[in-house]
Image (cartoon, rainbow, N blue to C red):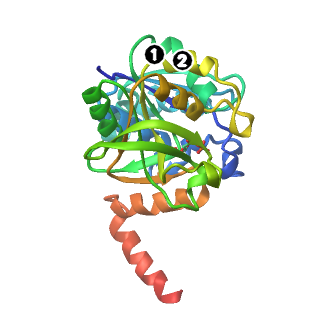
Amino acid sequence: MKVRKAVIPAAGLGTRMLPATKTVPKEMLPLVDKPVLQYIIEEAVESGIEDILIVTNRAKSAMDDYFDYFPELEHRLCRSGREEQAHQLRAVADMANFFYVRQRETRGLGHAIARARHFVGDEPFAVLLGDDIMMSKTPVLKQLIDAAEKYNCSCVGGQAVSDEALPAYCTTDLTHVEGRVYDVHHIVEKPKPEEVMSNFAILGRYVLTPDIFDILDATPPGRNGEIQLTDGLAELCHRERMVYVDFEGRRFDTGNLTGFLEATMEFALRHHETGAWLREYIKEKAKDL
Ligand code: G1P
């Protein structure tokens, strides 16, 4: 099994980050000096992905503009001696082969992934959710791809979350295989207390076989009246092997205000231009608190 393609669903309305996301896609909000989406794409590329499909909608053309050339701006930068910056802008557009498809109706994550059928064809593919930003030594998607290739099956990635947080995610029924790898027997989206099987939630990273598409097409609306990817995954893991990787790394939920601010601080503390300054600023500020 070789995983070369990735799908990034980015057609949500961003209602948890209003008013900022009324006209700016939440995936384009800057985390220090790059949009959130660029971190996701860098993780995919560092994991060996070559072709990337972004599932978008009619209000989000800023995303395809960002991963395109901008000759006028590049010429202007070159004329003023900023060739290095012009080169960096071009390198972003050259990171991968980008494709776009519009989800014409907002009918849920499963429905968004189902739009990728023609792009994916009959290969296994990765899914990266745009809200989940990772900070890790080995890219999180690479950890999943390694497991998917080793066990020759679908693979989902996550970590244990607290009892209080779990209802916002999903719960999994797992048995240990080796190291950080488990077999998946069942998954329930946004579990009620009596449905909790474990605290291991799936956190935004998946490697799936194309068998998911027939399943998604037949999946009825689930939680919130939306077609849920998780419901499709529950069916997929009943039909064929699926493993779970308890991935190494720190995950930030940039889809809500505190998660976004947490990620901003952590990335700013590690950024060569802002790290030292922010450390000093926090120390000074802490004296007044
Ligand atoms: C989605 C998935 C859920 C997953 C979560 C975090 O939920 O449906 O299973 O645990 O992302 O990656 P959402 O954040 O869209 O409510």
Q: Amino acid at mark 2?
A: Phe
Q: Position of residue 81 (x, y in %)?
A: 33, 41
Give the mark, 2 or 1, whose residue is nearer the N terminus: 1
Q: Position of residue 147 (x, y in %)?
A: 29, 34
Residue nearest the observer in this picture, 156 or 92: 156
**Secondary structure beneath disc 2?**
helix
Q: Which residue is mark 1?
A: 120
Q: Which residue is mark 2?
A: 213
Using the image, determine if residue 29 lies above or below residue 282.
above
Using the image, determine if residue 279 lies above or below residue 253.
below
Q: Quadrant of the N terminus?
A: top left
The residue positioned 53% from the left and 39% from the top of the image is 187
Residue nearest the observer in this picture, 238 or 91: 238
Looking at the image, can residue 5 be seen? yes
Q: Quadrant of the C terminus?
A: bottom right
Taking the image as shown, residue 241 lies to the left or right of residue 54, namely left
- Dividing the picture into quadrants, the one containing residue 4 is top left
The residue positioned 42% from the left and 43% from the top of the image is 174
Marks 2,1: beta carbons within 8 A: yes
Q: Position of residue 192 (x, y in %)?
A: 65, 51
From this viewpoint, which residue is outermost toward the right?
Answer: 225
Taking the image as shown, residue 36 lies to the left or right of residue 279, namely right
- Dividing the picture into quadrants, the one containing residue 93 is top left
Q: Position of residue 37 (x, y in %)?
A: 48, 39
Taking the image as shown, residue 247 lies to the left or right of residue 208, namely left
How dense is the environment of label 1, judged by Cα within 10 Å: few (below 14), some, or many (20 and up)? many
Using the image, determine if residue 135 lies above or below residue 237.
below
Q: Amino acid at mark 1?
A: Val
